[in-house]
Image (cartoon, rainbow, N blue to C red):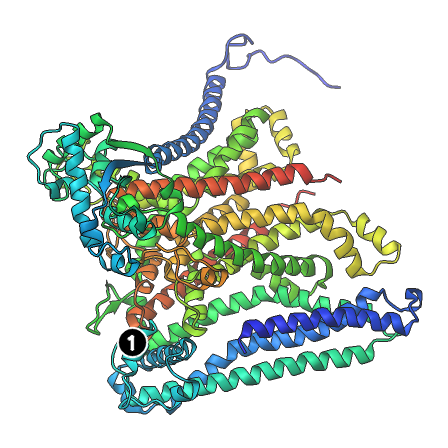
Amino acid sequence: MTDFSPSSTPPASVQTSLLTLSDRTKKRNANERRFKAYGIAAISVGLLMLLVLVVTIFGRGTGAFQQTFVTLDVALLESKLDKTGARNIEDIKRVSTFGYAPLVKGAMSAAIEEHGVSTSLKSKQLAGLLSKSAVAQLRAYVLANPQQIGETVEFRFLAQSRVDGYLKGRVSRDSIENDKNISVAQLDVVDALVAAGVIEKSFNLDFILGGDASDQRPEAAGMGVSMLGSFFMMLVVLALALPIGVAASIYLEEFAPKNWITDIIEVNIANLAAVPSIVYGILGLAVFINYMHLPMSAPLVGGLVLTLMTLPTIIISTRAALKAVPPSIRDAALGVGASKMQSVFHHVLPLAAPGILTGTIIGLAQALGETAPLLLIGMVGFIASNAPETLGEGLLSPNSAMPAQIYEWAKRADPAFYERAWGGIIILLLFLVTMNTVAVVLRRRFERRW
Amino acid sequence: MPTFWLIVILLALTACGFFGGRRRALASANGNPRDLHSLPVYYGANVAMSIAIPALMTLAIWLLVQPMVIETRVSASLPSEVIAENTSIGLVMGDVRRLSDGLDEAVVQGIFEEKQSFALNTEATDVRAALGTVGVALGSDVRPEVLAAAQQYRQLSSTGKRAMTLVCLMLALGGLALSLRNTNKTFRARNVVERGILALLVLAASLAILTTVGIVFSMLFETINFFGLHTWRDFFFGKTWAPNFRGDSELSMLPLLWGTLYISAIALLVAVPVGLFAAIYLSEYAGSAVRSFAKPLLEILAGIPTIVYGLFALLTVGPLLLKLFGQGEEGLLGLTWMSGATSVLTAGLVMGIMLIPFVSSLSDDIINAVPQTLRDGSLGLGATKSETIRQVVLPAALPGIVGAILLAASRAIGETMIVVMGAGAIAKFSANPFDSMTTITTRVVSQLTGDTDFASPETLVAFALGLSLFVLTLGLNVLALYIVRKYREQYD
């Protein structure tokens, strides 16, 4: 028989109310809250970093899309440009940019006089407010329109980078003490001319479309040519990585027998995806440039290197897309008499196409932003100022690429280039965001759930 | 004939072959496709593939191999005193190539007649000046031996090119004839075509292997060259990294490895706690609204190109740290710890930010894979949510999380742009995180950009460094995969 008798001594804990928490419970609850707070803090840190990054990029980069221009009426004196008066283009060409400098100086002095600005500066210092590219711009115009010689034409010249920096708040009167490019007296003139409307800030299309400029002229540097370089590289990547990647995935997913060779290929692809990008640059330098003697700095070489780098990404996403097509589709095709090859190419591949496309676009976006391998194959260190004209030239003549151009600007000494580097990043990110959005939209629009 | 036109001709032949084959097959069945073994397109495709594949492949291989063969033959025939004067065979061959390209260009532009260009000698003509007019700048006056080598180079190239054209066209025509002869209504065209396509697919898949082999061999050969010029003891066990051009460089990997590991450690110190807690919160606590909003936003961080992080380190984080921790004089915190904007901490912090989404999304997947029953059991016993996570979910997910951290470490070690722009260029052993230090990837970039001379140990060391980097990251990846596979709990 069981004999139950309540023990005479009750449990040690005296407190028995359910409405008050024991110390231990309180501690556990506090732990719980703390743990949750850590999580929230971690997410906030991550999101805060993203915010800081975005704010920094836009805060420091938007300035690059604006540029300070000086509007001047330049008298194209016949006595300076075409002494014979015969408008013979060969004679006009003989006048170098040096010969145009007096015209610019004259125009600047005239503008000063017209707006009643009093200054003790010489015309040379006044002309120094303009970019060094002003004379070249003038000469190009005259050579294109020789009939205008003798008339007075209105020009919009770029202001030099210090003037631009002054208007954007990058350069102040205190910061230029030891600067031999500009003086306080010149800034006084700038203030007066801004008030008169001669100097003004406006949108600068040349930053988006123009080429790079030497490190003396940050105000004239633009992203356009390096954008073309990136474009040609992406062309190569698309033309090679997509067909090869899709073919490899089809084989591995649909045809490959399960044996050790296939295993090796699979492990290999997984590892290739994790190889540091700079190693691909070393490969490109050793194989494509040193061994095959393809031209240095050519977008073709860049494209080949990026193709090798992108292939694993494309293969992995294509295989996932092929895997997502249900086996019943294959079985149905085989059941009505299609061969294995026909079932894949006629049925599985079209159904997997949206997934493949998404993966390809993401791979391309990754390749577009990659810099490290491009450094090794020489896509930095020179000035990409001339746009290629034909496809062959675009592939083979030296060029830069968007991220390489940004790196190049970040390396230069003049802080005016930093603004352009941030501006370049805005353009680069715009491309990446567009590509990723297209990929997401494609996936949403065409993805099928079976 | 330029290669471009050869390709155009081959493609045109292929197109003709396609229609020809199709027609011939139909004709053999008296125009009734039902009598054919395969669909008519397969007969066309069979002919087209027999033309294009052998010819185009030969063309590609020929284009790859020919320069090598010519190179070895020309360099073998160069007198040794020319090489001795110019220090290296590579430089002389560079001259030879430039000269022969220049002569070809001069013929195209009509400065020399085809015949005349081969009969040039250095005494009668100023070759350098003549080439200058067509826009080919030569570094020095042309030596007779170099000119002779260049002429041999051109001779061999043009012979090779002619032979290539001939062989490719023969192959194409042979393929055309053979496949057309085979084409009749009983020919099993589809099977043949499908076998051909399968072979192409296999070829594409093996390109992945080829890339790996290319990576390993390209670096291995140059590394062996490097160890021929420089002792391996110094590379692996030396103490200083001090390349110079006097020929007594000290090229040791260790200071670079120290910098790399130090920066990676700081990056992981930032990324692992933040990433892990973010993953725990997102998978265990967050409602679907927060999750669908915070997860993609965090993953944006992973999609930002590294050049952006590099610029951020160089122009924002570096100067900020400098302002806080002093710049010769006292900083805002009253300290004088830093001397320049580039430092281990600058690069490490920024790299940490970059790795946050990497750690968080991998860990997130792994935590989500822990079955709900484990959580329910723990909660049912009265554990709080955080106790469940710490004592049940995390131990179950641990191998996966370790794998994720190792993958992040391999990312950090191989990262280039952030350290190139943020870490500095001084190779030293120092424990001070405010010091400027350098890494393996930075040195690879600096040794291989600009003028590279593949005969000097200062250039070749980059390949040895690259190979070490490759082995290091590959090892970490393999280890990560191994841990994940070996210790993965099998729940179902």
Q: Using the image, determine if residue B25 lies above or below residue B142.
A: above
Q: Is residue B434 left or right of residue A309?
A: left
Q: Nearer the viewer, residue B254 or A328?
A: A328
Q: Is residue B390 visible?
A: no
Q: Position of residue B328 (x, y in %)?
A: 13, 41
**Residue identifier under label 1:** B138
- Amino acid type, callout 1: Leu
Q: Residue at x 58, y 40 (%)?
A: A438
**Residue B65, image x, y percentages:** 51, 79
Answer whether residue A188 is visible to the viewer in this image: yes
* Disc 1 chain ID: B
Whether residue A61 sits left or right of residue B65 in the image: it is left
Residue at x 81%, y 48% (from the top left corner):
A328
Nearest the viewer among B289 and A67 is A67
Frontmost residue, B125 versus B367:
B125
Crowd tier of the residue under label 1, counting other residues whose Cα lies within 10 Å: few below 14, some 14–19, many 20 or above? some
